[in-house]
Amino acid sequence: MQNKSIKLRVVFMGTSSFADTILAALITEKYNLISVYTQGDKKVGRTQKLQKTAVKITAENNKIPVYSPIKFGEKEIQELKDQKPDLLIVAAYGKILPQAVLDLPGFGAINVHASLLPHYRGPSPIQNSILDGGKETGVTIMLMDNGIDTGEILSQEKIEILPNETSVELSDKMAKQSIPLLLDTIFLWVERKISPKPQDNTSASLCQLIERSDGKIVWLNDAQAIYDQYRAFYSWPGIFTYWQRSDTNLRIKINKLSLGKNLSFGNYQLGEVFRSNEKVAVQAGVGIIFLEEIQLEGKSNLKIDDFLNGNPSFVGSILK
């Protein structure tokens, strides 16, 4: 039924693990992928070793030509034009495509966006849906225009957000659930059996690129909001706070915590660390959080009991 779609000359553009899951599915379905575009190799970790994107690794393993242009100037656009693509499939690419690129393929450019547009337009829809305490999100397949996720909608599917789900887990689930929707939508679009629908711009919301500083914990917030921040930023940038030890202000990353949403243990100050039976808790605006694994900047991740063995004064301190 989808043979016509498979024979199309398809260019895939994506970067993240979300995009890699979709690329792998297109390869499994034997789509005619003539090239893959992804972000360039980036330096990571303390060693600053260059690392390829997941999409690049998958493409190379399947002998698909890979391109990583810094921008789409005349040379890069002509290079893409020479490939004679029939369709662009884009997922979490991380670059804005100029109209000259979008106009090249006869069937246009289809984008897989991880929200129910027009909600959460922009680069961080999964994280923002969790930050806002959402219980539902979804995937939108849309035709791309030169705006930020403003194109006409081809199809959508709702997806539940589980209470303890991290952005990594939700992203993986959404990518997998988007695959059958994408494949069906491509076929219907190529066969002209589906009509694009404009978005309702009056109900649109925009999410910004996440920065490292966004992981700073505000202890005035309630425990549920802090827990949602932890879930949203689980992979990057993580959440952190500051601990005043002697005359030094130390940055502490909280790598694992649990929620005491409705618990209260007396007159503790905001950000105060205290013991609750066998657990180590921190007072939030409403409720508490339990610390399970933390990491001083430049040091190794430690379970909270191991950290306290070397830093007993941590209990009773006020985190900022």
Image (cartoon, grey):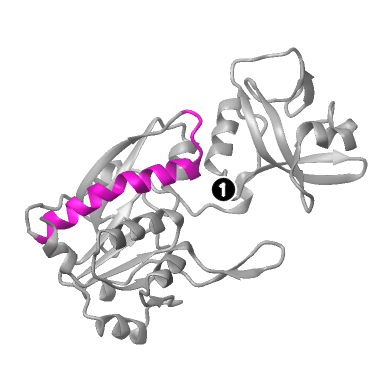
Which residue is nearer to you in this view: 288 or 311? 311
Picture coordinates of residue 282 (x, y %)? Answer: 72, 26
Based on the displayed image, in which of its 4 quarters is residue 264 positioned?
A: top right
Q: Compared with residue 302, is residue 101 higher up or lower down, i.e. above or below?
A: below
Q: Quadrant of the N terminus?
A: bottom left
Q: Residues within 10 Å of mark 1 (few under 14, many from 20)?
A: some
State the extent of the magenta-drawn residues as a range: 163-190
* Residue type (three-letter) at the residue carrying disc 1: Ser
Q: Compared with residue 166, is residue 31 higher up or lower down, i.e. above or below?
A: below
Based on the displayed image, in which of its 4 quarters is residue 126 positioned?
A: top left
Q: Is residue 66 left or right of residue 318?
A: left
Q: Secondary structure at mark 1?
A: loop
Picture coordinates of residue 94 (x, y %)? Answer: 43, 63
Q: Is residue 253 left or right of residue 214?
A: right
Q: Residue at x 54, y 34 (%)?
A: 228
Q: Compared with residue 152, is residue 260 higher up or lower down, i.e. above or below?
A: above
Q: Is residue 128 left or right of residue 106?
A: right
Which residue carries the number 1 mark? 235
Based on the displayed image, in which of its 4 quarters is residue 50 positioned?
A: bottom right
Farthest residue to the right: give it: 246
**Is the stretch drawn in magenta largely helix, strand or loop?**
helix
Q: Residue at x 40, y 30 (%)?
A: 135
Picture coordinates of residue 258 (x, y %)? Answer: 62, 28
Which residue is nearer to you in this view: 53 or 260? 53
Q: Residue at x 77, y 48 (%)?
A: 300
User: In this view of the protein, can residue 148 be seen by the observer?
Assistant: no
Q: Compared with residue 31, is residue 177 higher up or lower down, i.e. above or below?
A: above
Q: Is 56 colored magenta in this rendering?
A: no
Picture coordinates of residue 198 (x, y %)? Answer: 18, 50
Q: Is 176 colored magenta in this rendering?
A: yes
Q: Quadrant of the C terminus?
A: top right
User: In this view of the protein, can residue 109 be seen by the observer?
Assistant: yes
